[in-house]
Amino acid sequence: MSTLLTFPDQSHPPAVAKVPSAVTRLTLLDTAERLFAERGIDGTSVRDITKAAAANVSAVNYHFGGKDGLVEAVFFRRLAPLNDHRLTRLAAAVKHAGGSPVPLEDILDAFIRPSVDELRTGGYSDDFLRLMGRCLQEPNPKLETFLVGVFAEVVSTFNPHFLRALPGLPERELFWRTSFMFGTLHHALYKWSRFETCQFASMAGMPHTSRLTGEQLVRSLIHYAAAGMRAPFDLGTPLPS
Amino acid sequence: MSTLLTFPDQSHPPAVAKVPSAVTRLTLLDTAERLFAERGIDGTSVRDITKAAAANVSAVNYHFGGKDGLVEAVFFRRLAPLNDHRLTRLAAAVKHAGGSPVPLEDILDAFIRPSVDELRTGGYSDDFLRLMGRCLQEPNPKLETFLVGVFAEVVSTFNPHFLRALPGLPERELFWRTSFMFGTLHHALYKWSRFETCQFASMAGMPHTSRLTGEQLVRSLIHYAAAGMRAPFDLGTPLPS
DNA sequence: ACACCGTTCAAACAAACGTTTGAAATGAGT
DNA sequence: ACTCATTTCAAACGTTTGTTTGAACGGTGT
């Protein structure tokens, strides 16, 4: 019953931060990330985590204040730098454009590439990719509001540039197309990470030749999303057929 | 440990099917669908379901053989007719095309429209839309293989027509673009159903003017997906920027 | 040698989990 | 009236859940 409504404490052990024993904390974060990705959050018990991490059961409560705190910490550890990368890359693209509207492909690149590329080069495991693919539809309402807060700045920063790059697109339509793009990205990440780790049991008739490198996935996603976002939006007229 | 590997028994109570008492079964399916959509599968206990359905705890085990059986029944009840609608519409489009390749928009219409439109006109609730948005990434491996089986026929039937409508597209690329389309559709359904039921707590800066009718959503999705699937696929060359 | 603080640990907590049981209730067939 | 199969029910089964407890451990500063 501590103040779980605040942002995740990087310093849950009292104010005076101590350097040495970050090891248990880190191990818990890593194994929790992996198990959450494999079995889902509700499908993973703190005992599963602490056993796999060779830690004591109460370690989760000590370091994170409870399971909820651990969950938020798992997401925050990855999403914070990920969103930073996105904003940095967007800022670079804005500078490169020099006053004129940033090309749509560049905006999408700034948004999509960090998910696939920098998460890996940053030494991150594939586990979080699978976890992120699921984070958009998490039923836990506390976690949802937390995630909304984490994504808020990115959304509000990217949206104006999308609007400039897609002149004439109504704001309502933009909202849905960014949602489409989000769905495309996260589901693709999920599929791709499962593909990469060869963990797929029966991948619904997918040829083994479908394997893509991270760079290929990024480009394929950008092309797909760019074309989709530029599509006509004649919502009133009947379909061609 | 009964034979849960078989397809979901429509006749779990011994072979001689009985008509009258479908009421408890149906109520359980309905409330399970709703609660699964709201709290997730692992986040919903059989006690939650039976209490909300005003049934006894053991009713789930009696009618469905256990929680797993109930989960499969919930999905199968909706997905079976949904996929039937898809195949029927595709067949109609094939007939209408008369030998020549079915236009991409028509294929997508056959695939997407039933999700939004016929599920509603069929008297279905919004609950399953939210549930379906999550079903692609369910961690439960038993459920996953079950869902793969349910979708198998649809995938193998649609794929050749996608290939004909997109001449020159490598099969590997088609696999990923259909995955993108799946992700787009299911995430959009999730968002849209949450939007419709006004249950969104804080929808991440979405203007209230973003509300769409089912028909508008279908068209928006078709336009987006069609443009995306037709996008160039120069996976070897550097991006323009 | 002492005290101190951060950390770990085994043990236990009440609550909730899916499932099982055996006895009642129900209604149609003869 | 009786039988029989189907369905409901309250109660209990043994596990597992997240969390708490209080003692022990291991360094560091004095």
Image (cartoon, coloured by chain):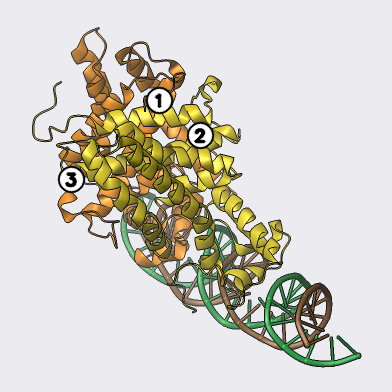
Chain colours: A orange, B yellow, C brown, D green
Can residue A10 be seen by looking at this rendering? no
Identify which residue, B141 or B219, lies in the foreground: B219
For label 1, the SS is loop
Between the residue at mark 1 and the residue at mark 2, the CA separation in whole angstroms equals 21 Å
Residue in the picture at 18% in, 46% down: B172
Residue in the picture at 23% in, 17% down: A103
The amino acid at mark 2 is Trp
The residue identified by callout 3 is: B171
- Circle 3: is it few (<14), some (14-19), or many (20+) Cα within 10 Å? some
For label 2, the SS is helix
What is the quadrant of residue C22 in the picture? bottom right
Identify which residue, B36 or A9, lies in the foreground: B36
- Circle 1: is it few (<14), some (14-19), or many (20+) Cα within 10 Å? few
Can residue A45 be seen by looking at this rendering? yes
What is the quadrant of residue B29 in the picture? bottom right
Report the residue that reaches farthest toward the front.
B98
Rendered location of residue C12, percent (x, y) = 59, 74
The residue identified by callout 1 is: A239
Rendered location of residue B77, percent (x, y) = 53, 56
Q: Earlier in the sequence, mark 2 or mark 3?
A: 3
Q: Is residue B29 left or right of residue B227?
A: right
The residue identified by callout 2 is: B192
Which label lies toward us, 1 or 2? 1
Identify which residue, A201 or B217, lies in the foreground: B217
